[in-house]
């Protein structure tokens, strides 16, 4: 489900995805084509985001990202 309605997409299982120093294994990706006039090239879903914790330390102007085992 998207902001503009239902989108039918393909599923692809990635063996490994590396994001910076973090590595995720066996990640299910939903491949979605965005319109040419769109300002984005992709979206990270909750299945990826939920593997991380984020700590905002405003007093030090830091964003601390840690990976936890799901």
Image: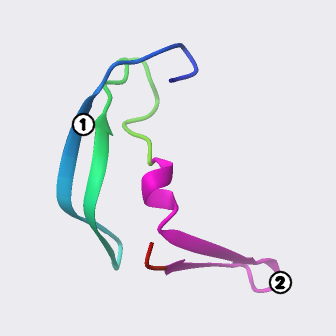
Q: Residue furthest front?
A: 70
- Residue drawn at (50%, 59%) of the image: 49
Q: Secondary structure at mark 1?
A: strand
Q: Residue furthest bottom?
A: 60
- Residue drawn at (30%, 25%) of the image: 9
| Label annotation for residue 11 | 1
Rendering coords of residue 42 (x, y %):
39, 39
- Residue drawn at (43%, 58%) of the image: 48
For residue 25, which quarter of the picture? bottom left
Q: Residue furthest right?
A: 59
Q: Is residue 18 magenta?
A: no
What segment carries the magenta color?
45-67
Is residue 39 shown above or below 54?
above
Is residue 17 shown above or below 10?
below
For residue 4, which quarter of the picture? top right
| Label annotation for residue 59 | 2
Other residues around mark 2 within 10 Å, as few (<14) / some (14–19) / many (≥20): few
Residue nearest the viewer, comparing 33 with 1: 1
1 and 2 marks in contact (CB < 8 Å): no
Residue nearest the viewer, comparing 29 with 58: 29
For residue 61, which quarter of the picture? bottom right
Q: Is residue 63 left or right of residue 22?
A: right
Q: Is residue 9 left or right of residue 39?
A: left
Q: Is residue 53 magenta?
A: yes
Q: CA distance from mark 1 to mark 2?
A: 42 Å
Residue nearest the viewer, comparing 60 with 47: 47
> What is the number of callouts on the image?
2
Of mark 1 and mark 2, the one earlier in the sequence is: 1
Is residue 69 shown above or below 18?
below
Q: Residue furthest left?
A: 15
């Amino acid at each position: 489900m998207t902001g503009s309605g239902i989108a039918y997409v393909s599923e692809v299982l990635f063996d490994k995805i590396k994001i910076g120093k973090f590595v995720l294994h066996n990640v299910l990706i939903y491949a979605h084509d965005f319109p040419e006039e769109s300002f984005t090239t992709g979206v990270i879903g909750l299945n990826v985001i939920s593997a991380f914790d984020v700590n905002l330390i405003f007093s030090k102007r830091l964003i601390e990202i840690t990976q936890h085992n799901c």
